[in-house]
Structure formats: C-alpha cells, structure tokens
Image: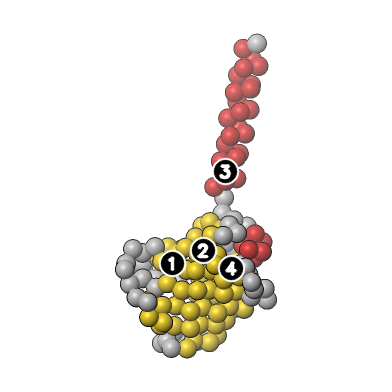
Amino acid sequence: MKKYIIVGFIVAVAVVGMLCWQHSRYPSDNLVRNILPGSWRMVSLSGDEGSPKGILTIAKNGGFEFQIETNGVHVVWLSGSVRVEDGFLVTPITISRDSKIPVPCDSRAKIILAGYNKMIGVIVNGSPTVDKIVYQRVRNDA
C-alpha cells in the first residue's frame, strides 16, 4: 500500500511538472503566424508618459502598416512585411514616412506571450535599453 502511495505521488509531481513546463514555454511560430492578421494597438510598457503608442495592421499576406504617435501627435507611418522566426517578430521596414528611420531596416521583438487578443514582446534591436511592448487586438479584419 505504501508503495502505491509513493508511486502515485511521484506520478502526480511529474504530471504537474510537465504541465508547468508546457505553460511556461514560449509560443510556437505557427501559433503566432496564425493570430497575427488584424489590427493591434501597441503600447510601450517603459512607463514614460511620452512613450510611443500605435496601431499595427497586419494583412494575411504578411504586409503591415504601422502608425505611431507620441503624446497624441502622429509621428511616424511605417510599412513593410512581417515574419515570425525562432520566437521573434521580425518586421523589415521598407517604407517610412514622417520619420528619420532609414529604410530598409529590420525591427525585432522577442515574443514572450501570444494569444488571440493579446501579445507581449521585448524589442531587441541592439539598443542598451529594453522596451517591453503589449499588443492588444483592435479588430480581426485583415
């Protein structure tokens, strides 16, 4: 009887451990690709009042338009394509209006959490500062 209790306890711990490991894994590239099309509101979590905010619209073919504003003023309009590679959201920017961003250039964000209505990422463009961003789905019309 004691053996069954010990074996049952070990199995229960192993199952709970597997569930926790699965839950803590980063989302798969295929999952992120499938949920991307649509419009997303982007907010920086840097905590600054003047942090950029924007609307990222992604088409089913992978093209995107990104309108960014700071302090309620339209600042930048970017366009290009989106791809998901090894847990990163990679956005090669091919058109930049109203900005000093040289094109072409790539922007990369490590995807931490991805769901149908919300994504969280960390921008990793080689900058010494880490900028965590949240994408909240606005609509799924792409």
How far from the left and from the top, in percent, is residue 20? 56, 41
Instruction: Check disc 3 and report the residue beneath it.
Output: 21
Q: How is the image coloured?
A: secondary structure
Inter-mark Cα distance, 3 to 4: 31 Å
Closer to viewer: mark 3 or mark 2: 2
Total numbered badges shown on the rendered structure: 4
The quarter of the picture where residue 15 lies is top right
Label 2, label 4: how far apart the Cα atoms are = 9 Å
Q: Earlier in the sequence, mark 3 or mark 1?
A: 3
Residue denoted by label 1 = 43
The answer to whether residue 120 is above or below residue 14 is: below
Q: Amino acid at mark 2?
A: Gln
- Of helix, strand and loop, which one carries label 1? strand
Contact? badges 3 and 1 (CB < 8 Å):
no
- x and y, in percent, of residue 41 in the image: 49, 69
Under mark 3, the amino acid is: Trp
Q: Is the residue marked by circle 3 packed among few (<14), some (14-19), or many (20+) residues within 10 Å?
A: few
The residue wearing badge 2 is: 136
